[in-house]
Image (spheres, helix red, strand yellow):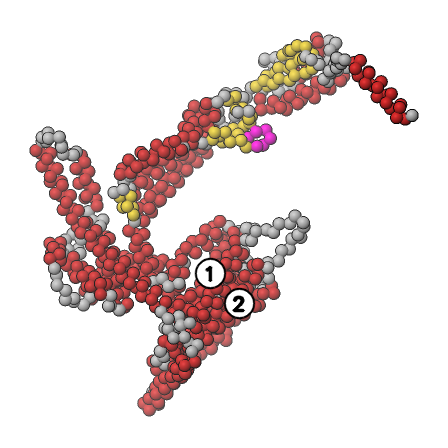
Amino acid sequence: MTAPRRWLTGILAALCVAGLGVGAAQAQDASGAAEAESPPVEVTVDAAAQNFTDVDTGETGIDYVLWDRLAMRVEQSVTQDASSTFSLERLRNDLVTWRDRFLAARSLNDGRIATVRAQLDALGAAPDDGSTEDPSIAGRRSTLEGQLARLRAPVVLANEAYARADGLISEIDRILRAREASRLTTRGPSPLNPEHWPSGLSALGSGFAGVWSEISAAFVSRARNGTHTEHAPQAVLWLLVAIGLWARGRTIWDGLRGQVVRRDGRGARAWIAFFSLGVVIVPYLGLVAFAKALTALDILGFRGNALLDLLPDAGLYVLVGRWLSGRFFDRGAHGENLLKLPPEVLERGRRIVAGLGWVLAFGALFIPLVRMGDASTVSAAVMTLPVEIVMAVFLFRLGRLFVINVDDAPDTQEKGDDWIAPPPSYRSRFMGLLGRASMLVAAVAPVLSSAGYAAASEAILYPAVTTLALLAMLLLLQRFVSDVTEAVSGPREDGQDALLAVLLGLFLFVLVLPVFAVIWGARVEELLEIWTRFREGFELGETRISPSDFMTFAMVFVIGYMATRLVQGTLRASVLPKTKLDIGGQNAIVSGLGYVGISLAAVAAVTAAGIDLSSLAIVAGALSVGIGFGLQNVVSNFISGIILLIERPISEGDLIEVSGQMGYVRDISVRSTRIETFDRTDVIIPNADLISGQVINWTRGNSFGRVIVPVGVAYGTDTDRVAEILQEIAEANPMVVMSTPPAVVFQGFGADSLDFEIRAILRDVNWVLSVKSDLNHAIAKRFAEEGIEIPFAQRDIWLRNPEVLRGADEQKSKNDGGTEA
């Protein structure tokens, strides 16, 4: 099998990893058949195996004698390390089947064991202080302990057998990995040695000659028997299908695409992306029909049919390369240019990608043809090296294309003296890294092959090309998902980066991670082993938590969380507005119900999953001390938040003043309270400050509040007249409550003015600033009309030694006169 075909087969095999759970269940169901088909093994059953005779099947249905024979045979093969890789892989598959059965048996009698343990706990522990116990209780305890031991016996045996099977599988995996590492690091003859060239050319000629001789012999035999035209009608029919697909298939496909796109204008881009697959599907079906036509003639022989089976796969490399080049590097109507490359390099990228497809197709046919000529390892390396060199050249050019266009990306912004280059995007950085890695692989692979490490060269070159193709397909698939999302939800400016499309793209990437692993040499069995470890779960105290427990926990918690939010929404929208509770009380009830509901959902989820956390109580108690010291402020704020929700000294919408900040309460959470000041700034106040500090609530209970407006007039002004004017102004304001009339207070004699104050009760204290502004405007206007002066600050200056200043001035005048003279 050629390297390209092997990688393609590996990708197809890795897709089975998505159904690992189904495959494991089927393997478990087929275990009985596997045992029946296994050849009889002549192994002496020792005393340890004889111990299994009493529990051959029992409640578990497991034949431990047969298992012990298989395990001893595997142990012998592993110890001697003389078995072939194929034999070890078969033994490993048998072990996996047995291990799955043991894993299922480990949960046998769980319900009964839990019930018996609960009964023993109800009886209590046996007295250890020498006191006697009632015989009936002691007898009952003894009976339950014996029953518990019998129930646990098959579980203990399953645990021991599981550990044995798991250890043997790990040993086989280590042997297989060591053999693969030895194969990659073993150096053979260099294909650059001219002495090996004749053998390589001879192998190629032998391959051609073998295929031709088989075809000639088959044709002559058919002609002699008169059957050479027996399958001609069938072959002609398949050939006509192939010609029709190549000649008219693409035209019909494009016409269908045009009709669908015209009917569904909003999803046009998604339909165009889908119908672009016609470039691959229609010609590939034509190749399959052509291969069927040649196969129907039945004249190719064994080697010819083997090459013919490779023909559709080889053509697929060319078709996929042409499709990817068109989707990424075509500037036409249906091109995508998803890599944001400049127009001048698109044609170059299209040629490189298409060339890689042709090289892979040539290698898929040429290398098997060489190996059909009974070529040795060195002969095959000689003929493979030119193909790898050409492939490496194309890969190097593609990587260099990425690196150059990322490093030298043009910037359309004008660069001033203080211009700072914007940081490269994630896609640009990833393209640069991918390009450098491709260039490195392209440079190293031919060197390794020339040095004799043909296996190592093949192990990095073909995976690199396949990885690039798979990443390109992932990017196109993510774009297609984004287009479909936009077609369903409507056009958006940021439709490509919509959250759903990003999450689906991430899911697709995680889904194909096993495929990447297989491409780079991981065995499918190793991926299944990872799934087995995950399915096995892990120990938490005395409880084993498996993926099913996680799923149960998540499902129950999500259901409880959604039910809590549903009840909260119903109360907030329908029930509480019909009560006499204020908005603060309603929010307190809704928030408290949310905390209780989420807590109950978490407890129910833990209980439903069967997670026993009692064994962690001591550890949790020890950790709680340290956590209490580290999170004491958080805990204090949390408790304060609960107190605020229960006592409700403040509510949402209240106007409060705390720690020098004044504003409206917008949100009360369990840790802090958010207030909005008059300048529209959000201030986060820890709840502990609201409980332990002084808080002024201006709107607690009602919205009435008092406004104080200070006023100063000049000395000598009639104070009674000033008081009358201020009283009239205060009473004329519509926000002032007249049931408690406003008061004008003559405060006293200030340093620069006679000080007055207007003190009035407002209907709504939230308008205090507006009322104060209106009163000041009215005062200024009325004082101007009445001729009352509003003084400014006045200061008297007293000079202690004025004669000194006069003497200094006279001396300065004399000096100035002397200078002029």
Residue 199: mark in rendering:
none
Percent coordinates x, y for residue 345 in the rendering: 58, 65
Residue 311 shows in the view: no
Main SS class of the magenta portion in the image: loop
The type of residue carrying mark 1 is Leu
Q: How far apart are the alpha carbons under marks 1 and 2?
A: 18 Å
Q: Nearer the viewer, residue 254 or 777?
A: 777
Which circle's residue, 1 or 2, is located before the other in the chain?
A: 2
Left or right of 414, for residue 291: left
Q: Quadrant of the N terminus?
A: bottom left
Q: Which residues are magenta?
A: 676-681
Q: Nearer the viewer, residue 768 or 808?
A: 808
Q: Nearer the viewer, residue 152 or 423?
A: 423
Q: Is residue 355 above or below residue 494?
A: below
- Picture quadrant where residue 518 is located: bottom left
Q: Is residue 92 above or below residue 416?
A: below
Query: Magenta stretch containing residue 29, yes or no?
Result: no
Residues packed near mark 1 inside 10 Å, few (<14), some (14 to 19) or many (20 plus):
some
Left or right of 555, for residue 752: right
- Picture quadrant where residue 363 is located: bottom left
Percent coordinates x, y for residue 683 in the rendering: 53, 31
Q: Disc 1 on helix, strand or loop?
A: helix
Asked if marks 1 and 2 touch (Cβ < 8 Å), the reply is no
> Comparing marks 1 and 2, which lies closer to the viewer?
2
Q: Is residue 339 above or below residue 603?
A: below
- Picture quadrant where residue 93 is located: bottom left
Q: Residue furthest right?
A: 821
Residue picked out by circle 2: 397
The type of residue carrying mark 2 is Arg
Residue picked out by circle 1: 471
